[in-house]
Amino acid sequence: MVSLCENGGELSFLPADPYAARITALEKTYGTNQSFAMFWVQRVDGIPAAAISRVDGNMTLCCLENADFEELFCFIGAVGYSSLTCDEEAMKKLGIEPSKSSFTVKYKGGAKAEADGILRDCDKKEIYNLLISCGFELGDYNAFLTDVCARLNKQTASLAAAEIGNEISACAFALFEGEKSVLLGAVATKKSARGKGCASKLVGALAKEKSDKEVYLFCRNDGLVDFYGKIGFEPVGRWAVSEK
């Protein structure tokens, strides 16, 4: 049975994985009483088996081994989504064709803790413009600003940026800081600043800083596995997104 969460404590069964990081960070940011942010738990024979979040139509699914995928498929179809993010194997079990997928990598240690020159508070419009220029699909700036500031204020996200010549040259986020795990992302570098180690420094600093929890990152494409491997990340599976 799938039922609405009434409080964040219902999500405590979730493992330390990137999908749980997203779900628990979003619940901590927005709570369970918002019409645009909803959270559900699936129970099989009374035992928690999966959790779902949907914030502004963007859905995340985290499954345990006892999840009932037939029920989940019916439920997800009934409530609808604009995008669905989950483990690639889970998406296969749902019978949904992903729009895109790539490797999930996990921090195993070894990154250098270089804090010098890292900005923690900077112009969010510069960050937005940098991400857009690097191919990120972010939608309207005001919606981006509202969401990012909400998570930064609730300490469910962190920002790290680098500057060259008084202009933001690179950025990286701990996008979702959950109860047991953290998902890094939104890693971008200006073309003129590439090859100088800016992104490596930022991702490494965040990974080191958050290493009291399990730290993950979704590669944007398969070719980035080697890049993140040099910072201490190893592939542990694949993520997938289905977009309507």
Image (spheres, rainbow, N blue to C red):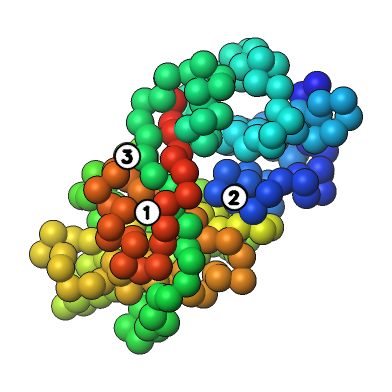
Tally of marks: 3
**Neighbours of disc 1 within 10 Å: few (<14), some (14-19), many (20+):** many
Which residue: 65% across, 35% down? 63
State whether residue 64 is above or below residue 196: above
Q: Given the image, on which type of amino acid does mark 1 rest?
A: Ala
Q: Could you tell whether 93 is left or right of 45 in the image? A: left
Q: Which callout, 2 or 1, points at the residue further toward the start of the chain?
A: 2
State whether residue 18 is above or below residue 43: below
Q: Quadrant of the C terminus?
A: top left
State whether residue 221 is above or below residue 71: below
Q: Could you tell whether 224 is left or right of 41 in the image? A: left
**Marks 3 and 2, how far apart at CA:** 24 Å
Q: Secondary structure at mark 1?
A: strand
**Callout 1–callout 3 Cβ contact below 8 Å:** no
**Neighbours of disc 3 within 10 Å: few (<14), some (14-19), many (20+):** few
**Callout 3–callout 2 Cβ contact below 8 Å:** no
**Res 130 → quadrant:** bottom left
Tell me where residue 221 appears, x and y as whole percent: 29, 43
**Neighbours of disc 2 within 10 Å: few (<14), some (14-19), many (20+):** many
Look at mark 1 in the image and give the residue it sits on. 186
Which residue: 24% across, 48% down? 223
Look at mark 2 in the image and give the residue it sits on. 17
Q: Nearer the viewer, mark 3 or mark 2?
A: 2
**Marks 2 and 1, how far apart at CA:** 18 Å
State whether residue 68 is above or below residue 128: above
Can residue 78 be seen here? The reply is yes
Q: Quadrant of the N terminus?
A: top right
Look at mark 3 in the image and give the residue it sits on. 137
- Residue 236 - label: none
Q: Secondary structure at mark 3?
A: loop
Tell me where residue 145 appears, x and y as whole percent: 44, 52
